[in-house]
Amino acid sequence: MPWRVMPTMRKAGYLPDPYAVWLSEVMLQQTTVAAVRGYHTRFMAFWPTVGALAAAEDADVMAAWAGLGYYARARNLLKCARTVVADHGGAFPQTYVALIELPGIGPYTAAAISAIAFDEASTVLDGNVERVMSRLYDDHTPLPAAKPVLMDFAMRHTSQIRPGDYAQAVMDLGATICTPKKPACGICPVRGACKAQMAGTQGKLPKKTPKKPKPTRHGVAYIARRDDGAWLLETRPDRGLLGGMLGWPTTDWGDTPPDQEPVSADWQELDTHARHTFTHFHLILRVQTAWLPRDALPDRGQFIPADTFSPDALPTVMQKAYTLAVATLRNV
DNA sequence: TATTCGTGGAA
DNA sequence: TTTCCAAGAAT
């Protein structure tokens, strides 16, 4: 990662910017490095300090987060930045105990920041470390029930010497060698100590409890433009799915799609629909489009001028609906 | 303790 | 095409 500080530099006393570390660790929650890289670069360019982020407009931050998912992270990111400014003088607290009090910072992130940015000997237990420990001790207890024992294993290994380097090293071991599929045991530095490697069970670990099948829900998105080109959008409520994000007015997403037109209009149903999969359900989203008169008065949402609107500010499912609708609206 | 909460890429 | 997931936190 470009925001990493190399071990040789750390040994000389340099530590990375806590703000950059916090931002990356929050973005990396349940998210791949490849997906995060561009977002982290843009956030650091737009808001170089926690003070700058704290002073940002909510809508700008949510728009910059669009597409990365788990939008509660972005809402908590702002809460956390503003708390750091208001209660900590604009400097991140340096200990696990203090960090975990902040919004959006849980056990893993508090451990990662305190270790990487402040060299506290905290134990990081993320998906990588869970995998490494389950294999090292050949523990077949299914996750998430196995977390306490895996944390106990991880604590035994946590180094009091250069704890920041250790935290990154054990996670990198999981990310690059002790991988979920086809681990590179032949080049693993702890091969000789790995019980799963000896038993030949590394490919089956960590064991996980089977997850429930995803139901399919249905909904309708209403994409309307006023005759001056303005788009009808609404900011979703802070709680729930896509909370705080800009999007098209939609029906509720349930088993049967109700009719909840945001404004009376001559709606045109598209002959295709968008498919999207969230964490816990599949969505089939039908799309209706309409042109509205200058004096239209919608029940929901607000008009965004054409020169202000960018689909990049929308969550991915809303971008899918937009892509389907654009061609049709052009032809009207 | 169990559920909610995104996304895009790999197999 | 469908499943499975990847550096979790909040409720």
Image: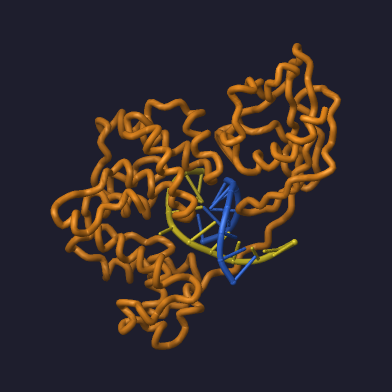
Chain colours: A orange, B blue, C yellow
Percent x, y for residue A263?
77, 23
Q: Horizontal and vertical percent for residue A283?
A: 71, 49
- Given the current orientation, which residue lies at the most extreme bottom position? A199
Please indicate whether residue A195 sits to the left or right of residue A160 in the image.
right
Residue at far left of view: A12
Q: Position of residue A299 (x, y in %)?
A: 73, 21
Q: How many marks?
A: 0
Residues B4 and A300: in front is A300
Q: Residue furthest front?
A: A331
- Please identify the quarter of the rendering in which residue A48 is found: top left
Report whether A214 appears left or right of A260: left
Residue at 21% x, 49% y is: A15
Is A159 drawn above or below residue A305 in the view shown?
Answer: below
**Which residue is painted at 74% across and 31% down in the image?**
A223
Q: Can you say which quadrant of the picture contains the C terminus of chain A?
A: top right
Place of residue A178 in the rendered image (x, y in percent of width and height, measured from the top left):
41, 72
- A325, above or below B2, in the image: above
Horizontal side, residue A199 vs residue A8: left or right: right
**In the displayed structure, would residue A327 be above or below residue A15?**
above
Q: Residue at x 60, y 68 (%)?
A: A210
Q: Quadrant of residue A247?
A: top right
